[in-house]
Image: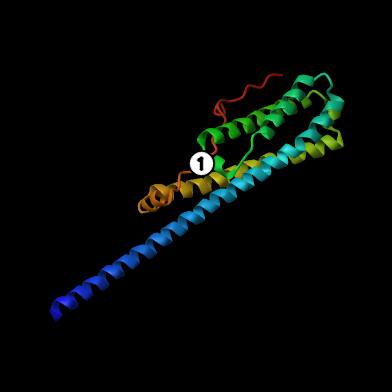
Amino acid sequence: MNRKLSIGIVLLIAILFVGSILLVWGVSIYNKIIGLDEGVKSGWSQVESQYQRRYDLIPNLVETVKGFAKQEREVLENVTNARARVGQISVTPEVLNDPQAFARFQQAQDGLSAALSRLLAVVENYPTLKSNENFLQLQSQLEGTENRITVARNRFNEAVQQHNTTLRRFPGSVVAGFAGFREAQYFQAQAGAEEVPQVRF
């Protein structure tokens, strides 16, 4: 009887030992996923920050151009309307888990980028405006912001890649499945971005 009891105790100790190793292993993977998830959220907040900076610059840019290019009313209205559409989308951290909301957000931002591109193309017809100090400062700030947006989006996509890779690989997929983590959405190129733009003079 003593021998059976001692074998049972050894077996119980072995089971507890293996169980504790599995628990530590699971917690470590869970913590890694939490860190990656926070990296995605941090990257997203940087993207939002740069979009907000651009959003705030646009009224000043439009007002500066208005004084010079009054006949370009349609272009100015398109920029203002695109900015308003961006402002109507409430962006919450949950948008990362909702592909439709994420697509709407990206589409609004792409529309604003396109409207700004048309505005800057119109400016080429106004040499006085191109040399105006206020416009030059705003244009420089806008160009810098567009570059920051690109950098922030690239960093965000890198964070999403690490996050999604961990969620899809074993054993992360098992832990993610139990914990309810889902893959995050990537920023993607605007439709038609692969085509070479036509320049006409």
**Label 1 secondary element:** helix
Is residue 197 shown left or right of residue 6? right
Is residue 110 shown left or right of residue 54? left
Is residue 8 shown left or right of residue 126? left
The residue drawn where x is 54% and y is 49% is 40
140 lies above or below 23? above
Q: Report the front residue among 157 and 120.
A: 157
- Asked if one can make out residue 193 in the rendered structure from this viewpoint, the answer is yes
Tell me the quarter of the image containing the C terminus: top right
- Asked if one can make out residue 148 in the rendered structure from this viewpoint, the answer is no
Q: Report the front residue among 65 and 17.
A: 17
Badge 1 density bin: few <14, some 14–19, many ≥20, Cα 10 Å: some
133 lies above or below 172? above
Tell me where residue 200 appears, x and y as whole percent: 68, 19
Circle 1 residue: 97
The residue drawn where x is 75% and y is 39% is 56
The residue drawn where x is 17% and y is 77% is 5
71 lies above or below 140? above
Q: Report the front residue among 55 and 143.
A: 55
Figure quadrant of residue 191: top right
Tell me where residue 181 appears, x and y as whole percent: 45, 48
Disc 1 residue type?
Asn
Q: Report the front residue among 114 and 4.
A: 4
Coloring basis for residues? rainbow
Please, which residue is most extreme toward the front here?
Answer: 1
Figure quadrant of residue 116: top right
Tell me where residue 42 appears, x and y as whole percent: 59, 51
The residue drawn where x is 58% and y is 48% is 43
Tell me where residue 27 appears, x and y as whole percent: 42, 61
